[in-house]
Image (cartoon, coloured by chain):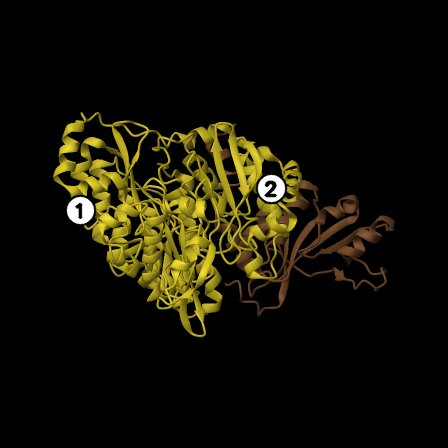
Amino acid sequence: MYQYDQFDHAMVAARNAEFKDQVERRLKGELSEDQFKPLRLMNGLYLQLHAYMLRIAVPYGVLSSRQMRTFAHIARTYDRDFGHFTTRQNIQFNWIKLADTPQILEDLAAVEMHAIQTSGNCIRNTTTDQFAGAAKDEIDDPRPFAELIRQWSTFHPEFTFLPRKFKIAITGATRDRAAIRVHDIGLQLTDKGFDVYVGGGMGRTPHLGHLIKSGLPGDKLLSYLEAALRVYNRYGRRDNIYKARIKILVSALGPQEYARQVEEEWATLDQAQIDAPHAEIARIKSFFPQPAYAEKPFDVASLERAKAADAGFARWVRNNTLAHRRDDHVSVTISLKPTGLPPGDASSAQMDAMADAADRFGYGELRVSHEQNVILPHVAKADLYELYRLLDQNGLSSANVGKITDMIACPGLDYCSLANARSIPLAQDISQRFADAELTDKIGDLQIKISGCINACGHHHVGHIGILGVDKQGEEFYQILLGGRADEQAALGVITGKGLSAEAVPGALERLIKLYLELRTDETERFIDTVGRLGREAFAGALHEPA
Amino acid sequence: MSLLNSSHAPQLVSDQGEVNVNGWTLLADDDALGVDQAVLSFGRAINELDGLNGRYGVRVAPGDDVRKLAPFLSKVALIEVAFPGYRDGRGYSTARILRQDLGFDGELRAVGDVLRDQLFWMMRCGFNSFLLKDADPAGAIRHARSLYTHAYQSAADGLKPVWALRHPA
């Protein structure tokens, strides 16, 4: 993975020194909360319902075992012994004391991490495929370009006060696991350069991104992005916070006209001053080699014996591993969705266990996925059973990846000051209702995504089943959306049926699933395919109790 | 030091920290042109500069397309870029277009909600003077200049991006 040089270290140290001074003046009362707010928001520090929350950037979701252990240390020392992995491949600590933040940032800097640009109307952490560099279907590795964007966007003087926040996602594989069509800019890396999608997003007016450029060379990426951001910075709406994202501008101008303006702006730029030279791209690429793969003799028969003897292991191998570019390895997803617990949470002991697992079986490398799970990208098949047992001893062996209980949920009203409704308790109820492993496997691949308000942090628009919490005359209600998906066939779900109370949602899902199991052609037709074939209206009736 | 601490009367300060008296006067669109060091509105500037002699100032609002000034820049000594609120970042693009696309080399001044925490970004985008709301304008400039010794990206201040230092030509 990327390693800081003197310049990277100096940049983070300078920002931390500046913020330390600001925190001290806030604690002494020299700054009011109103005055402090824009300063803390430049450093990922939010004031939530009950406490400060610190959001730490995990650049493009890649982290080392050493960095994971630092998260464990932060959870233990400064928080309530756990942290929350987010849909932006970051981590949040929800119970932080202001006075501790300078020391936390110093602890993070020691392992080349920070909280810069994890909030505010600036370019946020670039996200990517959690299996980058490992997946069998990868065309090119997106991580070096994500790092290139990280550096270019850090403290960019022109784009620190954009109309609204700005999120970029990159994928380099044929399967889109980075949800690029619902990002402000989505980049598809192909063998001919980048396809650039712009104007995707969720929130209260969801849009899918439009293709505005094909075959953009990697060594022209930064200047093209600079032009795209400049057009947005100049012409994006600033009169209404809900209409300020780039999707509204692109929709108002039309994608073709927006693309034309970007080309025009691009032509005015001194590109040679903006685009890093080949030597720099090569330097960054050199930090992302394939690991020094262990040549471990792999015996199919012994793996099969272990699976036969341990049904839990067999299920975990089936659901939580993905084909690797090498036949003797797989990528392993550690599910942070155990039955009845908040999606994406991990305790300090679990973080240490994941770091140990990475050191023993995964070349020291981990990833965070936007589905709020943790990945070991490279694991020798010969090590799978030992890894499984280590994870199992730490409550990390849930075998439900991609299944109905592998839900995305935002923090909701339990933490967030914007939320209308709770997300986590509902996710917990659903997870308990579908706890039966056999049933879960029978249902097959199904993504439920839950947001506690219209801002859509829980991605409800692109859930196969989306659940949106709303406030109706002081009561929490939930609307069900069907037919959304975030992959290479991205589509937005549509609200189906009437709003339901929290208590009614698990029962409604049960009826919905029962109907799906009756209607599907066979077990290879996934829920989303059946909805696609029959139309979501075929399922609307099932959401409500028969009269 | 804060983005919202705007209780101080604005003082004119250069990017070198020199505090100066502002000799320029912003004219209303129906004011006569007779005064020395007159600042014209953007609309008036693009309509009238063609027929005028001498050197003027121009006030550019966030929504103005500054490229329309290109034909008249030889008659412009000062451009004031208005920041009606610190969250409105359009002026940063305006400044870079003036400096890097149109080659404007006169005085580029940030006016309005200009506070010490913005100075670093503004100087990188090419501003070289500020009507700054701060008790200690010279100190604010010194502080902004001391924050970062390097930058990851090139802008309008001539600072070489870090990649150029990593790979000297």
Q: Nearer the observer, disc 2 or disc 1?
A: 1
Kind of element beneath mark 1: helix
Label 1 sits on residue: A392
Lower sequence index among marks 2 and 1: 2
> On residue A226, which mark appears?
none
Q: Amino acid at mark 2?
A: Ala
Label 2 sits on residue: A227
- Residue placed farthest to the right in the image? B51
With A481 as the anchor, is A398 left or right in this view?
A: left
Q: Nearer the viewer, residue B34 or B161?
A: B161
With A331 as the anchor, is B119 left or right in this view?
A: right
Q: Is residue B39 visible?
A: yes
Which residue is pictured at 22% across the width and 42% down the height? Answer: A315
| A301 to A33, vertically: above or below | above
On whether disc 2 and disc 1 are found on a single subunit, the reply is yes
Q: Colour of chain A?
A: yellow
Q: Amino acid at mark 1?
A: Asp
Kind of element beneath mark 2: helix
Q: Colour of chain B?
A: brown
Say which chain tag 1 marks: A
Q: Nearer the viewer, residue A172 or A505?
A: A505
- Please say if the residues under marks 2 and 1 sit with CB atoms less than 8 Å apart: no
